[in-house]
Amino acid sequence: MELNDILAIAGMPGLFKKIGQHKNGLIVEALDGTGKKIPTGANTKVSLLADVAMFTMDGEEKLASILITINKLEKDGLEIPNKKSDDKAFPEFLGKVLPTYDNEKVYLSDIKKLTNWYGLLKDNLDFIALEKSLSDANELDTDETKTDKAKAETKAKAEKVVKTANAKGNSKSKGKSVGTIRKMA
């Protein structure tokens, strides 16, 4: 299963997989093991997990990257807090996973939701494929950034040439009287 197939629905706990579509919305299946199928309405707010990110001091960090980090740290012995854990355990956990998270914008409920989501996904998600797709996306972003920088440099050089040409053109007229030629009678 890929992150692009998984949905979070506002007002409903857990995660869902899109299995179909009807006239006014989607048909989703709960990933909590019950296999319960639920229709959504046209006004239901649905988010793809691939589009979800958490606030950091530097901007945002994609959920895919955070899930990969959690998976690696869990293999190294990191304990993931559960529903019964003390509230202080959640920020400590996220501090180990994402040290640059913005503690003013990321609430305790967000961290609890993250740990819950990871618990639902860890047995169903292919983390190796997720890491590969994330690195491919980062390479694409890097290539686009290089292209954007090259375009900006070319534009700046062109503007500099125009400014230089204008300055040279204006310097010829300095000190000379510019006026209209009159025909003398």
Image (cartoon, rainbow, N blue to C red):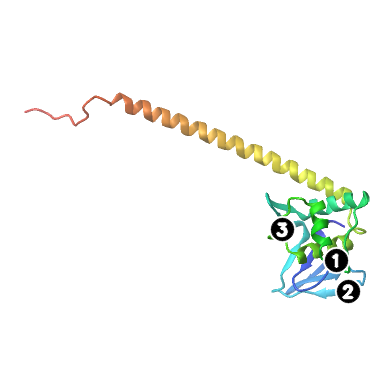
Graded by Cα atoms within 10 Å as few (under 14), some (14 to 19) or many (20 or more), the crowding at tag 1 reads few
Seen at 68% across and 60% down, the residue is 104
Seen at 82% across and 66% down, the residue is 87
Q: Earlier in the sequence, mark 3 or mark 2?
A: 2
Seen at 71% across and 58% down, the residue is 103
Please tell me whether residue 40 is drawn above or below residue 76 in the rendered image: below
Between residues 39 and 66, which one lies in front from this camera angle? 66
Task: Using residue 127 as the reference point, say whether residue 98 is left or right of it.
Answer: left
Percent coordinates x, y for residue 106 in the rendering? 72, 60
Percent coordinates x, y for residue 111 in the rendering? 79, 62
In the rendered image, the quadrant that contains the C terminus is top left
In the rendered image, the quadrant that contains the N terminus is bottom right
Please tell me whether residue 53 is drawn above or below residue 145 in the rendered image: below
For the residues labelled 1 and 3, the Cα–Cα distance comes to 17 Å
Residue under label 1: 86
Residue under label 2: 36
SS at badge 3: loop
For the residues labelled 1 and 2, the Cα–Cα distance comes to 31 Å
Task: Using residue 157 as the reference point, say whether residue 184 is left or right of it.
Answer: left
Please tell me whether residue 181 is drawn above or below residue 139 in the rendered image: above
Q: Earlier in the sequence, mark 1 or mark 2?
A: 2
Asked whether disc 1 touches disc 2, contact meaning CB atoms under 8 Å apart, the reply is no
Asked whether disc 3 touches disc 2, contact meaning CB atoms under 8 Å apart, the reply is no
Residue at the left extreme, as displayed? 185
